[in-house]
Amino acid sequence: MIWLIVLPLVWASLAFILGPGRGKWLAIGGLALQTVLAFDLATKIGAGGTAVGHLVGGWGAPLGIDLAADGLSAAMLLLTQCIALPLAVYASAYYKRDDAAGSYFWPLAGFLIAGLNALFLSADLFNIYVTLELLGLAAVGLVAAGGGAQQVAAALRYLFATLVGSALYLLGVALIYGAYGTVSISVLTPLVTSEAPRLVWIAGGLMLIGLMLKTALWPFHFWLPPAHGGAPAPVSALLSALVVKASFYLILRLWIGPFAPLIAAAEWLAWLPAALGTLAIFWGSWQAIRAERLKMLIAYSTVAQLGYLFLIFPLLAGAGAIQAGVMQVFAHGLAKAAIFAAAGVLIKATGQDTIAGLAGAVNRVPLTLFTFGLAGMTLMGLPPSSGFLAKWQIIEAALAQGHWPLAVIVLAGGLLAAVYVFRVLRQAFLLAPRNEEATAVSPLLEWPAFVLAAASILLGLRGVELMQLVGIVA
């Protein structure tokens, strides 16, 4: 667990010391080793059937810093490394040595991955705040890279959102510490009851609102489309596939952990995130259907796909809801990383970033169009993809508890996803005059994207081990 945090900090720092544009081989090697460590940790938790922990410096809670990993956090660590490694290979071909946008991509990406890994392993609320700040500042730096006016504006909007979200979360942590004298999740969980003072209810509300802002759940999504749609393709892929999932993970962790007695005392609260998720699915899909730029279409698709994650909250009292949510996290993470990477290839190949400019793209980059189609299958929820498995599990859990409107929403969202995915594919198959701005693309751009898209399909055929691992929740 320690090395999953230390390694990315080491190679990120070395990449910074080496200078602008350098450090890609350090990053790829470090991520390969981190992937092995994440698989090893997941295997040990799966074999032992219980969570594992580590006392940093030998000091445990409430004075020391605890690291802890159960099936849920191990799954998120595994997803992070398995997406970051192909994207690192992709970025090594995407950024040229003199590309200003890639000058500090490698150190910032390393700090971002370190923040993600530390967040998933942190076992107290204040350390989680520290990891949120590291994660947010690295993400803002990646969005601002290149210095274009639109990128800087999007980065400033993102910075405002992430700082406000972190401030709300930290205020909630301070109120909880004032009420209970601890920020350790393991110590705190048995102390919070349904008779908790009003101060704790306020703290929980502040923390959840702050994390929803960071997750870009509707109507807190205002920062996401310009940030994800305007950043370079490797950055968009990292942000959409991983960063917004971290704050969702924290919401889920708090919901089933310390705040579970509060939710049980007011069951109607579970329908609030589900209602916002429903609006996100329909509003994000509608904006994606209307978008003119390719990456903005994909960014609005992220707003819509995040809505599915919040449909599980009224279902958490029953079996299978957590597994359904995590499968949706994996499906969307793999597919969205692939589809943003494919978009970067399409823009380089055609010389244009509009959907109208994709005409004839199938003749230039057929593998990339196939990749886009595979990732689109996952977003639509077509069998045998992991997206189908995730949506099937949500529908099954909803029908088992008598909440059939949630099943209807899932099906409707899949149909809307088909509209914007096929809108891109249809345009790419149209004939077009020769474009002098079109350029050849490296196989190192096309194949990592294909691997991610193929993984999103193959996971739907073999998701049993992942579901068993996620079932080991502390």
Image (cartoon, rainbow, N blue to C red):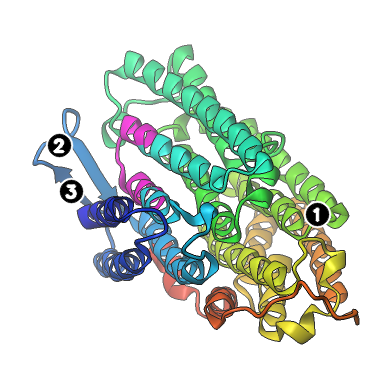
Q: CA distance from mark 3 to mark 2?
A: 8 Å
Residue at the image position 91 percent from the left and 82 percent from the top: 431
Q: Say which amino acid is labelled 2.
A: Gly
- Percent x, y of residue 276: 71, 39
**Side of 438 relative to 471 (left or right):** right
Q: Say which amino acid is labelled 1.
A: Ala
Q: Which residue is mark 3?
A: 54
- Percent x, y of residue 256: 45, 42
| Front tag of 1 and 3 | 1
**Nearer the observer, 257 or 403:** 257
Q: CA distance from mark 1 to mark 2?
A: 48 Å
Asked if marks 3 and 2 touch (Cβ < 8 Å), the reply is no
**Side of 471 relative to 406 (left or right):** left
| Location of residue 178 with respect to 236 vertically, above or below | above
- Label 1 packing within 10 angstroms: few (<14), some (14-19), many (20+): many
Q: Residue furthest left?
A: 58
Q: Is 115 covered by the magenta stretch?
A: yes
Q: Which residue is mark 2?
A: 60
Disc assigned to residue 288: 1
| Location of residue 134 with respect to 198 vertically, above or below | below
Magenta range is 112-130
**Mark found first going from the N terminus, 1 or 3:** 3
Q: Is 155 covered by the magenta stretch?
A: no
Residue at the image position 46 percent from the left and 64 percent from the top: 97
Q: Say which amino acid is labelled 3.
A: His
**Mark found first going from the N terminus, 3 or 2:** 3
Q: CA distance from mark 1 to mark 3?
A: 44 Å
| Front tag of 1 and 2 | 1
